[in-house]
Amino acid sequence: MDFMLEEELMDLMTFCLQNPDSSEVNEKKNRITEIGRELFLDGGVDALENFFFALQNRIVQEIEKDPSALRSLWNGITDEWQY
C-alpha cells in the first residue's frame, strides 16, 4: 500500500508543480491532504517525514522542481507538522 500511495503522491505533486494554473490543482491538493491523513494514521509524523523526504528527492531529480511549498498541505493533521 505504501508504494501505491507514494506513486499517487508523486503524480499529484508533479501535476501541481507543472500545472499551477490548472483548474484541477485544488482537487489534486485535496487528495494530497487526504493521503497525508492516511499516512499519519498509519505511521504518525515519522511517516509524513519519510514520505515527503523520498518524494522531494524524486521530484527534484525528475522534474527539477522543489515541492517544499506542498508540505503545508499537511498542516493541521498534527501539531507536530508545521510548515
Image (cartoon, helix red, strand yellow):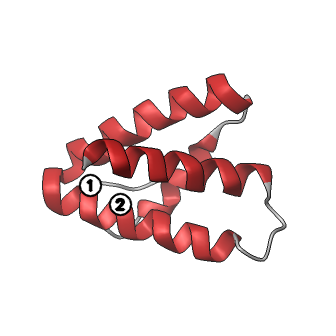
Badge 2: residue crowd in 10 Å (few <14, some 14–19, many ≥20): many
Q: Is residue 13 left or right of residue 47?
A: right
Viewer can see residue 78: no
Residue 53: x, y in percent? 42, 33
Residue 70: x, y in percent? 57, 54
Residue at x 24% of width, y 50% of height: 1
In this rendering, the answer to whether 52 lies above or below 62 is below
Q: Quadrant of residue 22?
A: bottom right
SS at badge 1: loop
- Whichever of labels 2 and 1 marks the residue nearer the N terminus, that label is 2
Badge 1: residue crowd in 10 Å (few <14, some 14–19, many ≥20): few
Q: Is residue 66 left or right of residue 75?
A: right
Q: Quadrant of residue 34?
A: bottom left
Viewer can see residue 20: yes
Seen from this angle, which residue lies furthest top?
61
SS at badge 2: helix
Q: In the image, which disc is placed on residue 80?
A: 1
In this rendering, the answer to whether 70 lies above or below 55 is below
Comparing 11 with 52, the one in front is 11
Q: Amino acid at mark 2?
A: Gly
Residue at x 23% of width, y 49% of height: 45
Q: CA distance from mark 2 to mark 1?
A: 13 Å
Residue underneath mark 2: 36
Residue at x 51% of width, y 74% of height: 30
Front of the two marks 2 and 1: 2
